[in-house]
Image (tube, rainbow, N blue to C red):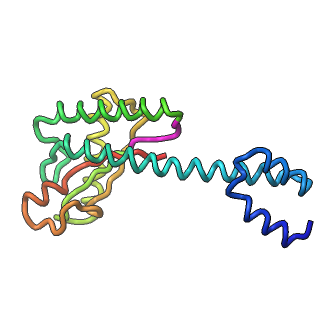
Amino acid sequence: MNAKLLSILLLAIAPTLAHASLADDLNKATGSNLGSKLEGQAKAKAAAEGNKQIAAQVSKKLLAEGRKNQCSFKSGSDELAPGCSSKSKKLADIIIEVKKSLQAHGQTGFKFVVSGHTDSSGDAAKNKDLSARRAQVMVKELVAQGVEAGDIESVGMGSEHMLVKPDNTEAKKAKNRRYEVRVRF
């Protein structure tokens, strides 16, 4: 088979190689396992796209629940304000429920990521460190409430992703001192 024709054929059928018979036909036509390789690549690409969509949907739910069950941090501190226990329990229960749902639908290889955030006050490097400590505090809190330690990790974001810009009042700064939970595949 002419190389140019083979290239055109591959481009035309690569998206549909999920059907084993097409892969087998291509294997026979080329005398190789090219069809099987392309089929595997197409399946991997489809799985990755599916995971992106699932992660977006699940993360949207987790972000909304996190906002409803947000524990406050004192300014310049990783100390949780009083009254956090019932909020963190609700959030932990949601995370556990999401994990069970993902597993029931055959999803694996995911982690829940708690990101800590600060307001824009102070030094950026110190804020990055503070946000990392806040995320670690929330991970410990969620683990204490029943989330498996191996399912969750923390990351500090500093003031890179503020909810409220500019944060020029105490109320706005308080909204930026937060954590968020997402799922990552």
Q: Where does residue 9 sit, x and y in percent of width and height?
A: 79, 64
Quarter occupied by residue 118? bottom left
**75 lies left or right of 153:** left
- Residue for point 52% across, 40% down: 109
Q: Nearer the viewer, residue 83 or 106?
A: 106
Quarter occupied by residue 80? top left
- Residue for point 74% across, 59% down: 13
Quarter occupied by residue 70? top left
**In the rendered view of the protein, which quadrant contains the N terminus?**
bottom right
Q: Where does residue 94 sit, x and y in percent of width and height?
A: 31, 34
Q: Name the main secondary structure of what is drawn in magenta.
A: loop
Q: Total marks drawn?
A: 0
* Image position of 106 with respect to 174: above or below: above
* Image position of 117 with respect to 165: above or below: above
Q: Which span of residues is magenta-colored?
A: 107-112
Q: Nearer the viewer, residue 170 or 92?
A: 92
Q: Is 20 one of the magenta-colored residues? A: no
**81 lies left or right of 89:** left
Q: Is 108 one of the magenta-colored residues? A: yes
* Image position of 52 with respect to 126: above or below: above
- Residue for point 31% across, 39% down: 139
- Residue for point 86% across, 51% down: 27
Q: Where does residue 117 sit, x and y in percent of width and height?
A: 25, 55
**113 lies left or right of 122:** right
Q: Where does residue 130 sit, x and y in percent of width and height?
A: 25, 53
